[in-house]
Image (cartoon, grey):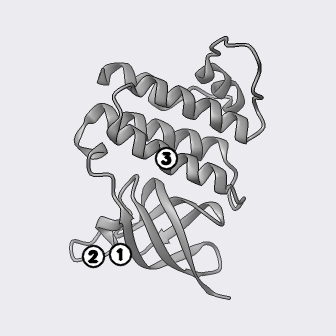
Amino acid sequence: MRSFKAEGIVIKRNNYSEADRIVTIFTKKNGKIKVKATGVRKIASRRSPHIELFNYCIFSLYQGRNMPTLTEVESKESFPLLKKDLKRIGLAYHVCELVDGLCAENQEHQDIFMLLGKTLRKISKEENLEEVIHEFELELLRLLGFHTRSSSTERINTQEVIEEILERKLKTKQILPQLS
């Protein structure tokens, strides 16, 4: 099967060559995948607005030799409230950085997909954003098997745990204090 559809959220994008972009999508059935979006950096591209960060879309893909190529895309949810506030954008980027760094490619994680969508919705609407992010980090670590629910109510420093797992500093950790 060369053509397939995938439901997912755009978590990362990088420019590639003159008019293309490599988009990292966290999908419901395939987990994290990288997709080549040809021609989306051209002004006349109809697909370009759909593959913005944090967009929840249905992607039509063609499996090429190296990586899937985007043929069509349809937006389901674009989180407009989230994209109006710089602090919320920074927190959403932090969430996407964690998913991108901690999840392996091509491994199905429907529970993490649902958690990511739910967290982006909460970031758009709720006021206590620090608690939303801490809950997301704890649940992500639990779902990936790095943390278990303990009976203690002690609040662990999830960012330090994540940095130990990734063996690098989080990029968003340096930016978030400036957005407050």
Classify residue 29 as left or right of residue 16.
right
Residue type marked 3: Lys
Q: CA distance from mark 2 to mark 3?
A: 30 Å
Residue type marked 2: Ser
Q: Which SS class for mark 1? A: loop
Q: Identify the residue under disc 1.
A: 39
Mark 1 against mark 2, which lies toward the viewer?
A: 2
Are discs 3 and 1 less than 8 Å apart at CB? no
Q: Residue 72: x, y in percent?
A: 42, 80
In front here: 34 or 144? 144
Q: Residue 168: x, y in percent?
A: 62, 28
Mark 2 / mark 3, whichever is N-terminal: 2
Q: Count of labels shown?
A: 3
Q: Which SS class for mark 3? A: helix
In front here: 109 or 45? 109
Residue drawn at the location 39% of the way across and 58% of the way down:
55
Are discs 2 and 3 less than 8 Å apart at CB? no
Numbered badge on residue 78: none
Q: CA distance from mark 1 to mark 2?
A: 7 Å
Q: Which SS class for mark 2? A: loop
Circle 1 packing at 10 Å, graded few (<14), some (14-19), many (20+), is some
Residue 63's quadrant in the figure? bottom right
Q: Identify the residue under disc 2.
A: 45
Residue drawn at the location 66% of the way across and 65% of the way down:
30
Numbered badge on residue 118: 3
Residue drawn at the location 35% of the way across and 75% of the way down:
39
Circle 3 packing at 10 Å, graded few (<14), some (14-19), many (20+), is few
